[in-house]
Image: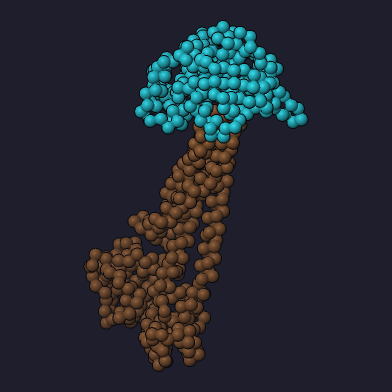
């Protein structure tokens, strides 16, 4: 999947005040890689990821997915792209508390109408890959923070997407668990996926193939 | 999570109470309107003659004085358009407890045996045991199933009413609430037992085919100064406003309770959705179709409705039985076998579906809220 952003701008209005969270950001990623976007809190990282992940619409500018302007797509078409071509990892994991680990991972496959048997096999295999083979039936509250993030990674991989978008995936984790998660994400990128991570974790920056910085909404490539 | 469970539980309890109340009151009201409608069916197409000042509920005389049977019948039969006359003695109650209570607590009916078919139609005797008494019988009577069961009466049981020993020769196997609570005996015997020799309190007059009920009733009223003759329409006109009013109040009560249930479910579901904004935003972020999210919320509110409606059905049916028992003084246990007569299955099903439907409706606005979340804003705000 090729993602191209052209003069991407996102302005939030709070009363009469306008805040430009992303200011004319342009970039292009076309091949599997580990991409890190770094910046201070409030610099616009999450907003940029939400735009790239089609969870938000830019105030101006364009995002092209495989040369298709996503602003021209309907809500359900954008949702379909999110479901089948993108995987999301959130800072606070965002697992559904009423579902167990297996069901959380099966969910995106169920939404994509995959056969029940395939869902179960794939979810089990993904959870085993992230080291949770013995925790399949545990609910989020029965898992540690690191384990929850692993389930979230497995969920992001469920529909075998081309792009994984992770927003501060290690922010809530201790350094040892963070290291393990970074290793997992790195593995994923080496298996031919595009991994886009917003972070201020230096270890993640070290592992990245491409690093962007964002400051006051302005995006720059640093390496 | 605990607060949400607690709130849902309270919502279910609220629905159970609302449904129970509606079913108990609705079923009790419906039972009495049904009884009144049943009475109407028994005397279709006939003119009912009572003494002046008697209140008539369809075909049951309340109060008023007695009519001299032979004299009145003779005068009516001499009139044009009369096919036959059926003299009836209604007595409420038969004396158990000694308190006058309204139908269908119990009542006695004396009617010439050759006219029993007018009242009973094809009603068989329970288990085909026993027989119908003859006109000449001096002590044979038939009783309704409910009355027989309440007092443990069977064919052959002897009961004493006003110092007369009466023998039960048949138990009516009927589903009509009115007949279920009646003691029916030959007219002469009834007149003797209740000390109304030669008197009746109502005479049903059947007009000949094609003769106008209205003309006949007018002629009877003009010719016999001490009677009032009422056509079927006039009797309906007397009771219809009361029935309509009862039904209107019943409908109003149902509407008010359902409206409150709707608001309750909507409030609880809105709170539940707003507490789980992150879950719904996450679902949207990972690509769940809006219809899927909408269905989750509707399903949840429907489940609350199904649970509240189901439990409300059980408690409401019990409540209806308790009300019926309190109102009629018939022991509660006797109502259990006939629970579906007090609360008809169709009414139960209708109420259950209505509660579930109301809860579905209550889920619509929260469901729309759940699908209209701005994912980016919700996810950012939750951090």
Could one spot residue B266 in this view of the protein?
yes
| Residue sticking out furthest to the right | A16
Residue drawn at x 34%, y 77% is B118
Q: Is residue B143 above or below residue B380?
A: below
| Residue B146 quadrant | bottom left
Q: Is residue A185 above or below residue A118?
A: above
| Residue sticking out furthest to the front | A67
Residue drawn at x 35%, y 75% is B119
Left or right: B61, with A167 as reference point: left
| Residue B162 quadrant | bottom left
Q: How is the image coloured?
A: by chain
Q: Quadrant of the C terminus of chain B?
A: top right
Give residue B22's position: percent from left, percent from top.
50, 54
Could one spot residue B333 in this view of the protein?
no
Q: Which chain is cyan?
A: A
Q: Is residue B144 above or below residue B223?
A: above
Front residue of A69/B268: it is A69
Give residue A186's position: percent from left, percent from top.
50, 11
Q: Which chain is brown?
A: B
Residue drawn at x 48%, y 47% is B356
Residue drawn at x 44%, y 15% is A130
| Residue B371 quadrant | top right
Front residue of B127/A142: it is A142
Front residue of B56/A128: it is A128
Give residue B290's position: percent from left, percent from top.
53, 36
Give residue B170's position: percent from left, percent from top.
27, 70
Front residue of A93/A25: it is A25
């Amino acid at each position: 999947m090729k993602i191209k952003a052209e003069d991407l701008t996102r302005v939030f209005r709070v009363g009469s005040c306008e805040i430009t969270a992303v200011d004319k950001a342009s970039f292009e990623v076309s091949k599997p890689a580990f991409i890190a976007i770094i910046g201070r809190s409030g610099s616009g990282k999450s907003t940029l990821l939400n735009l790239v992940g089609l969870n938000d619409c830019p105030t101006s500018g364009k995002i092209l997915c495989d040369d298709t302007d996503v602003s021209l797509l309907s809500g359900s078409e954008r949702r379909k792209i999110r479901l089948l071509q993108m995987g999301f990892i959130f800072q606070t994991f965002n697992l559904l508390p009423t579902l167990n680990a297996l069901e959380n991972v099966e969910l995106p496959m169920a939404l994509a109408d995959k056969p029940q048997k395939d869902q179960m096999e794939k979810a089990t295999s993904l959870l085993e890959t992230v080291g949770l083979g013995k925790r399949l039936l545990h609910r989020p509250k029965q898992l540690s923070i690191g384990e929850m993030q692993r389930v979230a990674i497995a969920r992001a991989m469920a529909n075998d997407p081309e792009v994984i978008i992770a927003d501060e995936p290690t922010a809530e984790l201790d350094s040892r668990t963070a290291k393990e998660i970074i290793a997992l994400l790195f593995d994923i990128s080496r298996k031919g996926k595009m991994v886009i991570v917003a972070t201020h974790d230096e270890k993640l920056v070290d592992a990245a193939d491409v690093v962007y910085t964002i400051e006051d909404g302005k995006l720059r490539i640093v390496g | 999570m605990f607060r949400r469970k607690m709130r849902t539980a309270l919502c279910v309890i609220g629905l159970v109470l609302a449904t129970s109340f509606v079913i108990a009151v609705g079923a009790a009201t419906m039972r009495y309107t049904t009884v009144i409608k049943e009475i109407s069916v028994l005397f279709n197409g006939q003119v009912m003659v009572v003494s002046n000042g008697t209140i008539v509920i369809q075909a049951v005389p309340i109060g008023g004085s007695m009519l001299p049977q032979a004299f009145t019948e003779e005068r009516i039969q001499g009139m044009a358009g009369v096919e036959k006359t059926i003299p009836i003695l209604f007595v409420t109650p038969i004396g158990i407890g000694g308190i006058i209570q309204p139908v269908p607590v119990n009542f006695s009916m004396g009617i010439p045996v050759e006219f029993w078919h007018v009242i009973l139609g094809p009603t068989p005797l329970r288990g085909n045991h026993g027989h119908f008494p003859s006109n000449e019988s001096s002590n044979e009577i038939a009783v309704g199933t409910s009355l027989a069961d309440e007092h443990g009466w069977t064919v052959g049981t002897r009961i004493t009413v006003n110092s007369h020993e009466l023998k039960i020769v048949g138990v009516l196997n009927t589903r009509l609430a009115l007949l279920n609570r009646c003691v029916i005996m030959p007219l002469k015997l009834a007149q003797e037992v209740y000390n109304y020799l030669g008197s009746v309190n109502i005479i049903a007059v059947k007009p000949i085919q094609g003769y106008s009920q209205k003309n006949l009733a007018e002629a009877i009223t003009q010719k016999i100064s001490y009677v009032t003759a009422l056509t079927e329409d006039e009797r309906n006109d007397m009771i219809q406003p009361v029935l309509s009013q009862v039904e209107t109040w019943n409908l109003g009560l149902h509407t008010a309770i359902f409206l409150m249930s709707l608001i309750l479910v909507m409030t609880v579901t809105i709170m539940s959705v707003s507490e789980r904004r992150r879950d719904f935003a996450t679902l949207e972020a990972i690509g769940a179709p809006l219809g899927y999210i909408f269905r989750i919320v509707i399903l949840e509110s429907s489940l609350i409705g199904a649970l509240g409606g189901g439990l409300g059905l059980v408690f409401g049916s019990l409540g209806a039985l308790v009300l019926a028992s309190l109102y009629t003084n018939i022991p509660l246990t006797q109502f259990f076998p006939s629970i579906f007569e007090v609360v008809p299955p169709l009414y139960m099903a209708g109420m259950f579906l209505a509660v579930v439907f109301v809860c579905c409706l209550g889920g619509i606005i929260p469901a729309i809220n759940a699908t209209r979340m701005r994912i980016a804003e919700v996810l950012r705000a939750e951090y």
